[in-house]
Image (cartoon, rainbow, N blue to C red):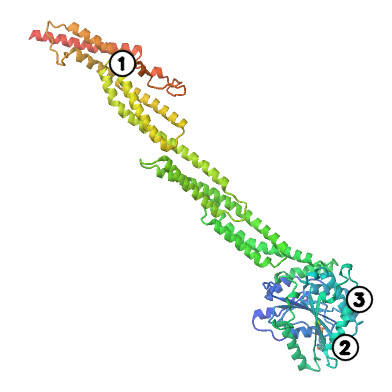
Amino acid sequence: LGAQLNGTKPTMNGHASDSNESSSTSERLQVINDEKNFTTHLTSQIGRWGLRDAGFNYNIVAVFGSQSTGKSTLLNRLFGTTFDVMDETRRQQTTKGIWMCRGKDMDVMVMDVEGTDGRERGEDQDFERKSALFSLASSEVLLINLWEHQVGLYQGANMGLLKTVFEVNLGLFGKKAQDGSQGRTLLLFVIRDHIGVTPLANLQATLTADLEKIWDSLSKPQDLQDRQLSDYFDLAFTALPHKILATDKFEAEVQELRKRFVDKTRDDFVFKPVYHKRIPADGVAFYMENIWEQVQTNKDLDLPTQQELLAQFRCDEISSVALADFTEQSKSQRRPIEAGHVVEGLGDLMRDWRSQALSRYDRDASRYHQGVYQRKRADLLGVMDSTLSPLFLGQLKNLHRSCLSAFKRELLEGLRGDEYSFADVVEKARTKCETRFADGAKEVSLEDTDWTWQDELVSLREEISNVADQCRKDETKKMVNLIERNFRKQISEPVDISLNKATPDMWDKVLSTFKETLEKAELTYLAKAKSFNCTDDENVASLAALRKRAWLALRAKIDEQTADTAILGKLRTHFEERFRYDENAVPRVWRPDDDIDGAFKTAKEQTMNLIPRYAKITPVDPSLEFVLPSEPSDPLNSTDEFDFPSTLVIFTETKSLDLTSRFRKDADAYYVEAKRSTVSSIAQ
Ligand code: GDP
Ligand code: MG
């Protein structure tokens, strides 16, 4: 017997079937043993009975009555349960405690409360009270089982049991009765061994009168003085024939009674919704255990508090189950996000996980105390959102990065080729980039969160501007380079010609060329710069740089034309043109009486006069001396590394002397040659 305590035992009623499922549904469990300990198996047993997910779609019925009045027998017949029945031959006392079975083919939990009537045995009234509390807190229907001959014995022990039930009920549901819900219980009196001499109606009247008397005799709390028995209980009565003397009739009437527990369409169907204690099936075990613990420790049983405790416990459990799946799902995207990827459709994924977890939670938890359910739901949402938040932020950061590099790519793409407006290219790329970012950010923003992406957009915008600025500077530089190259090409020939001719206004021509070409270059720059959205400052700086570079290009050209060999060549040509050719550019043939010395001297002096002309850029028209503007900020003004006036000097004094002496030697050679030619002509 000991092995059965707190354990389960397969069916004993011979209906044990072949399938596992039906054998587990016929299992019974001792919920409270004779040591008054609560079982640890109720949750799993409710699962094995297949009732765990029943929600509110199940019923609980308990039986009360004196020892050996055929309670277990009745339950087994009515519900197809497998409770122990006292062995006739040995008249053995069954153990005390509360047993539970699942009704066969019905979603009903049946409680067999053994040894309830302690009075009869003159003992444990404590257990009677506790089991009454326990049963009333959860049962919809209480079967009160009694012999016919016990009816009317108001002072009888069985009525003491009812007094206990009433008292306990007042404590449990007294305050709640006003709203009519959750506190109502059906007391179904089953009168056993009804011989039939006294009609049921008479027995019923007697019992009802007795119940009213008991009710009146209760010492009720002040605020519940006016309460009627009918405020808390519905009463129903039925009688059964003698099981041994009228076996067939007994069995038939029990089967008839069973219909009242099964057939919802009957008027006398016992499990009316109003009796339901609204404990979700998956919370029954925890609830009962708590009730029992309160009962055991003699604490006041405050059912609303118990329901809240139950709700807290179950909502936490349900929440953590929902959260476990959610956490698993959200983990899957952590790696790609951390690796810097933009996860396509991450928002939808997150929405999905979140609503899956929520609906899982709602499905099971919404049956519990609404306040607790809502509070825990908010907690769950909070935990989920804080789990998702790093994914959101990571996605934003990755989106930011990828949009920025797309922007750079787009920009380079657009700036390929010659015909483009820089401003248009930038604007198009910027719009595309920002739209892409905003779309992605919206997708990944979850409803009902305080998540924002505006700050990230602001910082993206800043970086876009930086990139665009840098790009504009590069482009401007490229453009200035191009203009400078063209400038070089354009001045090359005019400067060559001017420097070759070496007319007195040579520098005026050079500077005029410079000025005109530079003006054209500046206009080209300004035309192009319009599409670059350059600032005025930038334009001023670029133009100044352009001017300086143009000037240096001119100087380079001049340097090239005035390098030693080039300048000596020029001088020689100049000299030759004057000494070896006459005014009509006809080669001279010297005759002995020709004034070779005079001609030589003139040509030499004229040519040597050119050296100071070449030596410094000095226009005849003084206004041309300032081809370069001279605002103080102008980089062409003297700075440490650039001193404009010094760039006007082509040859130093020393260099001029050197060139003079080298030219002299060249000229002397021509002179000697000329002399020789006359000598040879004489000699001929
Ligand atoms: P319990 O202690 O109230 O659960 O009673 P049991 O169901 O164990 O039955 C106690 C004894 O009464 C057993 O020997 C049964 O055979 C017998 N018994 C059961 N039902 C009836 C009945 O309707 N009338 C009579 N006279 N005896 C019954
Ligand atoms: Mg029994």
Q: Quadrant of ligand 2?
A: bottom right
Q: Decide if residue 181 is on the left or right side of residue 344.
A: right
Q: Decide if residue 380 is on the left or right side of residue 414.
A: right
| Residue named by callout 3 | 217
Residue 118 visible here: no
Question: For residue 559, which quarter of the picture?
Answer: top left
What's under tag 3, amino acid-wise? Ser
Cα distance, mark 2 to mark 1? 150 Å
Cα distance, mark 3 to mark 2? 23 Å
Q: Earlier in the sequence, mark 2 or mark 1?
A: 2
What's under tag 1, amino acid-wise? Tyr
Secondary structure category for the residue under label 3: helix
Ligand 1 closer than 8 Å to the CB at disc 3?
Answer: no
Residue 235 position, x and y percent, is: 81, 80
Check if mark 1's residue and mark 3's residue have beta carbons within 8 Å.
no
Q: Residue at position x 45%, y 22% from top? A: 631
Q: Residue at position x 12%, y 5% from top? A: 593
| Residue named by callout 1 | 614
Question: For residue 639, which quarter of the picture?
Answer: top left
Q: Residue at position x 88%, y 82% from top? A: 209
Q: Decide if residue 539 is on the left or right side of residue 44.
A: left
Q: Which of 437/400 is in front?
A: 437
Question: For residue 74, which quarter of the picture?
Answer: bottom right
Residue 149: image tag:
2
Q: Earlier in the sequence, mark 1 or mark 3?
A: 3
Residue 531 visible here: yes
Cα distance, mark 1 to mark 3? 139 Å
Q: Is residue 514 above or below residue 118?
A: above
What's under tag 2, amino acid-wise? His
Secondary structure category for the residue under label 2: helix
Q: Which image quadrant: the N terminus?
A: bottom right
Q: Residue at position x 44%, y 29% from top? A: 540
